[in-house]
């Protein structure tokens, strides 16, 4: 990954916060006895200029597989970073993230704990390793869930800190 200025790190973080995804994917492949868990950081958008900007730093750009739902909709693109590249990116941008900071922290933790000791090479994973990966997968899935939060008042307080909310800062 090339050297990235603080301004670019802040921009990348803003795009991840607004248009992005930080999570763990789980794939089953009949060739392997255990599912494969992969850390992913991605941004989806219809403007190729954004994709060109992001891909100069890391990742790859892919057209989304689904064609546009409506005839006047644009083709969407996905900038995607996986595993080692994703964790390196998260470490660089995490201080600038506002909305997906918790996902970034869990993503970094997932990669360092789950892959620091054992990289999936297609073998059978022990139930302890598999349970640990599943736990991160489920926690990130819950954080990324769409729709309203159960308690709407806790979300801003968690992001900004209760002191700031109470003092009106």
Image (cartoon, helix red, strand yellow):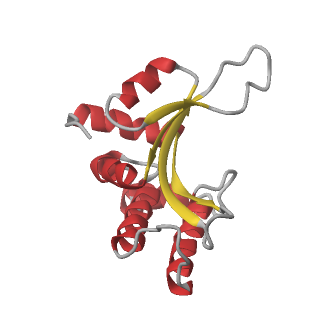
Q: Nearer the viewer, residue 105 or 160?
A: 105
Name the residue: 47% across, 58% down: 103
The residue that appears at 68% across and 33% down in the rendered structure is 65
Location of residue 42 with respect to 37 vertically, above or below: above
Residue 152 percent across, percent down from the top left: 62, 58
Q: Is residue 24 above or below residue 132?
A: above
Answer with the quarter of the image where residue 166 lies.
bottom left
Q: Position of residue 107 (x, y in %)?
A: 43, 61
Q: Position of residue 167 (x, y in %)?
A: 37, 56
Residue at 42%, 55% (x, y): give it: 83
Q: Quadrant of the N terminus?
A: top left
Residue at the far top: name it. Answer: 72
| Rendered residue at 35%/68% (across/down) | 112
Direction front: furthest residue: 31
Compared to 127, does 24 lie above or below? Answer: above
> Is residue 117 toward the left or the right of residue 27 in the image?
left
Seen in the image, is 99 located left or right of residue 85?
right
**Quadrant in which residue 109 is drawn:** bottom left
Give the camera-side residue of 112 and 28: 28
Quarter of image, res 62: top right
């Amino acid at each position: 990954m090339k050297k990235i200025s603080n301004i670019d790190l802040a921009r990348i973080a803003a795009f991840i916060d607004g248009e992005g995804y930080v999570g763990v994917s789980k794939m089953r492949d009949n060739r392997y006895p255990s599912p494969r868990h992969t850390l992913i950081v991605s941004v989806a958008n219809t403007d190729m200029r954004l994709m060109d900007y992001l891909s100069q730093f890391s990742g790859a750009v892919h057209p989304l597989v689904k064609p546009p739902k409506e005839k006047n909709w644009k083709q969407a693109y996905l900038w995607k970073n996986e595993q080692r590249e994703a964790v390196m990116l998260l470490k660089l941008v995490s201080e600038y993230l506002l909305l997906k900071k918790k996902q970034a922290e869990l993503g970094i933790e997932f990669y360092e704990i789950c892959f620091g000791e054992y990289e999936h090479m297609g073998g059978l994973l022990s139930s302890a390793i598999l349970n640990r990966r599943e736990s991160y997968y489920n926690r990130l899935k819950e954080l990324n869930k769409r729709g309203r939060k159960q308690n709407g008042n806790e979300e801003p307080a968690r992001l900004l800190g209760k002191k700031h909310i109470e003092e009106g800062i």
